[in-house]
Amino acid sequence: MKRILLVAKTPLLSRLEPAVLARMTGSGASNLERLRGAAAAHEATLLAVRKALSTHRVNEWQIDRLQPRDAEGKDLVVTVGGDGTVLTSNTLDSELPMITVNSDPEGSIGVYTRCNGATFPALFADWLAGTARTEVIPRLQVRIDSGPYWRILNECLFASANPAAVTRYVLEIPGAGDTPPVREFQRSSGVWVSTAAGSTAAIRSAGVTPVPADSSALLYKVREPFELRGPLALTEGRQLPAHGLRLIPGMPGISLFIDGPYFHRGVPPGSNVDFSPSPIPLRLVASV
């Protein structure tokens, strides 16, 4: 008998107040039938996953209730949702393997998902038998001064908590080998810092060329640099392999947004925000 943490999303249809839902669908901003279809697909997938896990000890949590230590004492994490569910589960303080289930394949891209409701039982059986493949995805980590590390699966945005405010900071690239460190004071809308796996997401939209997802990499891109007082030299970088990056806020009100908008931390002015390769990758259970 295995001990399993099952983490499931709550479909958008269930999260919206009736008045909000009516306004969204009535205005054409969202399609009611599509929302209903996505919710039905998710519930059917979750039912199939529960059935396959029924002979094991399962703790089931909604994604919005997840805490970093919820995986303690478990053998496996199973996520049911899409990439957002996987990214939020990345905040777990755990080295456990994950089986990631796409609960709405027709509507969810599922870059980080490796099965669906129909194929989950077979993949779970392979994991139990020790015959499944483990896919290793390198991550980055970030910490403020000497505080705890937070793992980054996709990307991190270093920016003012007020999206209309300029962000002032020092960007520093540490030396590597015989190369001395370089630093520059900058004003911009913030800085994207991305893993290799996240290089096809926001940082690609900002103009950075992606790299293979299984490589050790640190990519950064300065958003909307303020260059009226002269051009900036350090507006984009690709480290293969990753070795590090430091950002030092020169103003209050700056935050780190890690893997989306839900996990964020304020950064005190003058503190060191250090990015480095994580020694612990994400381990996804996949078919052979």
Image: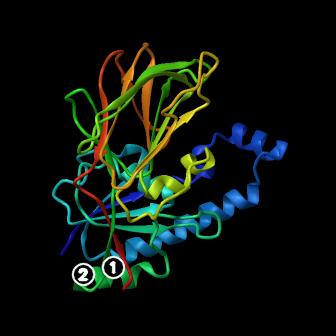
The answer to whether one can see residue 67 in this image is no
> Where's residue 234, x and y in %?
48, 33
Q: Residue at x 59, y 20 (%)?
A: 230
Q: Nearer the viewer, residue 202 or 224?
A: 224
Q: Residue at x 43, y 63 (%)?
A: 213
Extreme-front residue of the structure: 178
> In the visual, does 48 lie left or right of 225?
left
Q: Give the CA separation, mark 1 to mark 2.
A: 6 Å
The amino acid type of the residue labelled 1 equals: Phe
Q: Nearer the viewer, residue 79 or 245?
A: 245
Q: Quadrant of residue 244?
A: top left
Name the element at disc 2: helix
Q: Residue at x 63, y 62 (%)?
A: 38
- The answer to whether 55 is drawn above or below residue 256 in the figure is below
The quarter of the rendered structure image containing the C terminus is bottom left
- Number of marks drawn: 2
Q: Nearer the viewer, residue 92 or 283?
A: 283
Q: Residue at x 58, y 64 (%)?
A: 109
> In the visual, does 144 lie left or right of 195?
left
Q: Which mark, residue 124?
A: 1
Q: Residues within 10 Å of mark 2 (few under 14, many from 20)?
A: few
For disc 2, the marked residue is 128
Name the element at disc 1: helix
- The answer to whether 197 is drawn above or below residue 48 in the figure is above
